[in-house]
Image (spheres, rainbow, N blue to C red):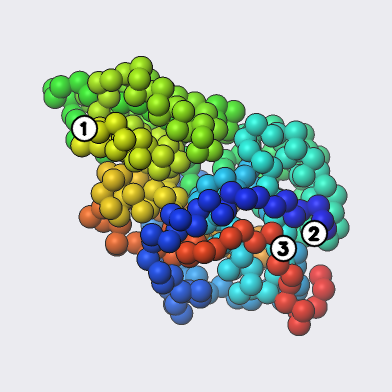
Amino acid sequence: MATFYRRHSRAGRRLLAALALLPAFWGSQVAAGERWPLMLWDAPQEQRQLLREASDTPLATRGWRLCAIYPHLKDGYWLAVNYGMKEEARRLGVGLEIAESGGYHNLEEQRQQVSKALDDKNCHALLLGTVSYDGLNDLLSGHAGAKPVLALANDIAPAGVQGKIGVPWQQLGLEIGRWLAERHPAGTPSTDIAWFLGPQEAGWVGFLDAGFREGIAGSAINVAVTKWGDTGRLTQRRLVEEALEEHPGLRYLAGTAVMAEVAIAELRHKGLQDRIGLVSSYMTPGAYGGLSRGRILAAVSDFPVLQGKLAVQQAVSHLEGVPARSFIGPEVSLLTRDTVAQYPARWILPPAGFTPIYTLPPNPALPSP
């Protein structure tokens, strides 16, 4: 199984410089009794309540092997998920095999990976960070119930999926939209922004956009241009350059964390850092560093390290016959330079120097499933 799932990427190495700027201590183990701020996201909005659940769930009774498929490992978001999964799998004693699909344009490759994982008898549960909301429906519905399949971070159509770990991405867009609207309410001068959404084919993009548009509705925020594109650094830098050239009156660049990362240097190079603000729709090591230094004004976080840990916990619960949640994830929080210190960095980021883990064997002391 390791030969199929191991797909090495050099993307993690590019993060080391950004990670070096972050706090040096995360703690490899969670503190005893630490409680995570979680939400049951499938509850009606008016009934959602913040949970604070203990992180120290029981250890596995069998040497289960979990398989996880990510869209990519191009940025620190999925690296953080990977770190969280590795830490929790090691703590619980279960095995972990990771594949990455190489990007949101690689639906066919992910379909092949999913098909092999579903057929692999040594893969006891599949954690799926999909590249498409409904592009895997036929594969998953055909294997419904054969083994637990849980959506990881990215939303997915419910066919053949036993649970979801993550947050509604419209909530991320809503938070940054509201933040901008509060700064520029109706009746104040119109404020032009550029909105960077990520890959148009990615399932989460439409939800993010819908939440953002709801958040800015009725305000003085005007989306002067919307840019779509892969979340790789080269693509995001090109899109930033295009937006600045096409719309010289922009006041904000808002959108992907990679955009915010590369825009820091681009704005400084053009002498625009004091006129144009940056807002990130999720968190990466580079965005965290930019936020801490005041280069990024605001960033919303869905705590990807916690999502990785929760995903492993929920998969093991399914395998052990313990009741699991149908859609659970961290609380969504908007962070600024003044509030970022209120949240443990270990919930958001991998530690400095962490590189992706593709294979982790189960605890040999545990009996085989």
Instruction: State how far apart marks 2 and 1 are (Cα).
Output: 50 Å
Count the marks.
3
Quadrant that contains the C terminus: bottom right
Residue 183 falls in image quadrant: top left
Tags 2 and 3 in contact by the CB under 8 Å rule? yes
Q: Earlier in the sequence, mark 1 or mark 3?
A: 1
Specify the label residue 275 is tagged with.
1
At 47% from the left edge and 33% from the top edge, which residue is drawn? 236
At 86% from the left edge and 58% from the top edge, which residue is drawn? 121
Q: Residues within 10 Å of mark 3 (few under 14, many from 20)?
A: some
Q: Earlier in the sequence, mark 2 or mark 3?
A: 2
At 47% from the left edge and 64% from the top edge, which residue is drawn? 352
- Where's residue 207, x and y in %? 48, 33
At 51% from the left edge and 31% from the top edge, which residue is drawn? 235
Mark 3: amino acid = Thr
- Where's residue 337, x and y in %? 26, 53
- SS category of the residue bearing label 2: helix
Specify the label residue 2 is tagged with.
2
Q: Which residue is mark 3?
A: 359
The residue lying toward the viewer, choosing from 104 and 130, is: 104
Q: Does 24 sit left or right of 200 as displayed? A: left
Residue 1 falls in image quadrant: bottom right
Q: Earlier in the sequence, mark 2 or mark 1?
A: 2
